[in-house]
Image (cartoon, rainbow, N blue to C red):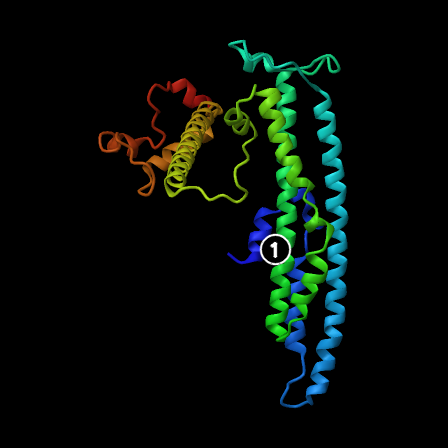
Amino acid sequence: MKFAEHLAAHITPEWRKQYINYEEMKALLYSAVEQAPSAEHVEPEVLQRYFAKFDEQFFHYCDKELTKINTFYSEKLAEATRKYANLRSEIVETPFDDDKKEKDKSRNILRKKNLPIRKTQELKLAFSEFYLSLILLQNYQNLNFTGFRKILKKHDKLLSSEVGARWRTNHVENAHFYMNKDIDRLIRETEQTVTQHIEGGDRQKAMKRLRVPPLGEKQSPWITFKVGLFSGSFTILVIAVILSENEHLNNCGKFRAVRDISVAPLDCSDQMLIIRMMDDDNGVINRRKKKNIKRKEENPRFMLEGESTDELDAC
């Protein structure tokens, strides 16, 4: 996986603008190489001046990115330090008694004196969320250093120089966000605090509570297969239910349409029209036509079945 994709997959979305702008810096490098004058048509001094001017602009951009990252890291680290102090203030230690069988339970307890409303589970959740924020900040630190290392190495490769390596040594490796190790200390102290003061000395239980899956961890093929199989089966089931419901609604609609049709009463003109349609060769065949052929010739206006002579005279 290319680093640009790796960076995009591992960043914290809320901090997106605070990471190294790796894509922009890479675009600057490729643009400079493409626009550089051909070595076959210009003097070497001209080519050197061109890349020297580009380096001035490029490393000025790198310096702005480095300042941005140092500032953001310092702010988040100070915020994490204050948060840890507040969480620690909510926990009180009790003397450890080696002679008791239940020493792990009596060694440390959670204090509710200062926070009468907060429950024990809420305090445990607060430590879990805080620990996650520390891991994200540590990840921020590592991703940005890797980004600088990658882009400066690409600079030296494309421009056939060693300026990028020297700039990394003098600036990035001495930067506050990289040199400062307080984030590692906070992570260790949080693990110790949860182990000793919340889980009664059970580190395995404490780490299970604080466990953060590796960012970007790949699932095993078997898990992926099971998830895909379940998702596909569920999707098919939902589609089948929807189609069945639509078919049911359509049938109900057809039934209502037939049921709600109203037929106006027939008058004399309608009766004569129906008679002509039944006698027409292209119309409906009159099943009594052959039997009443003679009657029809004598009286074209033969009576409909069940119709009286008075009704026809009324027409």
- Relative to residue 280, is residue 68 depicted above or below? below
Residue for point 75% across, 44% down: 74
In this rendering, position of residue 190 left or right of residue 278: right
Residue ranking furthest to the top: 100
Residue ranking furthest to the front: 99
- Relative to residue 5, is residue 114 depicted above or below? above
Element marked by disc 1: helix
The answer to whether residue 29 shows anywhere in this view is yes
- Residue to which mark 1 is pinned: 146
Residue for point 52% across, 37% down: 213
Closer to the camera in the image, 22 or 285: 22
Closer to the camera in the image, 78 or 64: 78
Q: Position of residue 132 (x, y in %)?
A: 62, 35
Residue 209 occupies quadrant: top right
Q: Tell me if mark 1 has few (under 14), some (14-19) or many (20+) residues whose alpha carbon lies within 10 angstroms of its own.
A: some
Q: Position of residue 263 (x, y in %)?
A: 47, 25
- Relative to residue 264, is residue 55 depicted above or below? below
Closer to the camera in the image, 122 or 135: 135
Residue 114 occupies quadrant: top right
